[in-house]
Image (cartoon, helix red, strand yellow):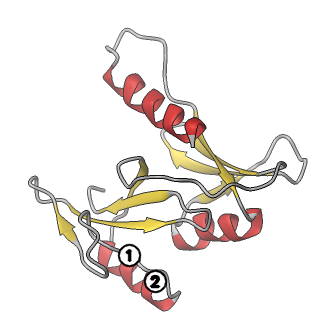
Amino acid sequence: MKYLTLCITLIFASISMNAKSQTKINHVAVYAKDLKASGEFYGKIVGLQEIEEPFKDGLHIWYDMGMGTSLHVIARETPWQEPTIMKDNHLCFSVADLDGFIENLTKNAIPFEDARGNVAQVNIRPDGIRQIYIRDPSGYWLEINDEY
């Protein structure tokens, strides 16, 4: 939980830095209760492309998130503790076809909700962007929107 919060904080900090800064986002890491289930979720449901896993230890799966960033899904080697994560702390991915994404969620029996927690509802932000929220197999929140 603390690690995910730190990663998200670093993402926002790197975005707000000026153009002359040499600091950039490199990756986000999430620990998985079940590495296989989380790997299938991020690959088949979210649609991220798996990339080479340099550690080759069977404890990591890496995904390309675009613009030189990656997502590292890591098997938890110590006993799993259910995360207490509010929806405010989330990763956000943009898709070109939100309706098609929702159709795939429905086909795979994955629940989604709007920003207020209304099940199977799409939220429209003040800027007109449509968004939904889903949870990965370990309980982490993801926003999926159509700001593609």
Q: Is residue 88 above or below residue 13?
A: below
Image quarter where the C terminus lies is bottom left
| Residue drawn at x 61%, y 59% as measured from the top left | 49
Q: Residue 41: x, y in percent?
A: 60, 69
Residue 113 left/right relative to 14 = left
> Tag 2's secondary structure?
helix
Q: Residue 121: x, y in percent?
A: 25, 78
Image quarter where the N terminus lies is top right
Q: Residue 102: x, y in percent?
A: 37, 79
Which residue extends farthest right?
57
Q: How far apart are marks 2 and 1 (CA)?
A: 11 Å
Q: Residue 45: x, y in percent?
A: 54, 73
Residue 127 left/right relative to 91 = left
Of residues 110 and 146, the one nearer the viewer is 110
Which residue extends farthest bottom?
107
Task: Determine which of the numbered discs, if any, sits on residue 50 in the image.
Answer: none
Task: Determine which of the numbered discs, if any, sits on residue 112 in the image.
Answer: 1
Do we see residue 91 in this rendering?
A: yes
| Residue drawn at x 52%, y 57% as measured from the top left | 140
> Tag 1's secondary structure?
loop
| Residue drawn at x 39%, y 85% as measured from the top left | 103
Residue 75 left/right relative to 64 = right
**Which three-letter amino acid code belongs to the residue tagged 2?**
Asn
How dense is the environment of label 2, judged by Cα within 10 Å: few (below 14), some, or many (20 and up)?
some
**Which three-letter amino acid code belongs to the residue tagged 1?**
Phe
Task: Determine which of the numbered discs, if any, sits on residue 104 in the image.
Answer: 2
Of residues 3 and 65, the one nearer the viewer is 3
| Residue drawn at x 79%, y 47% as measured from the top left | 53
Do we see residue 69 in this rendering?
A: no
How dense is the environment of label 1, judged by Cα within 10 Å: few (below 14), some, or many (20 and up)?
many
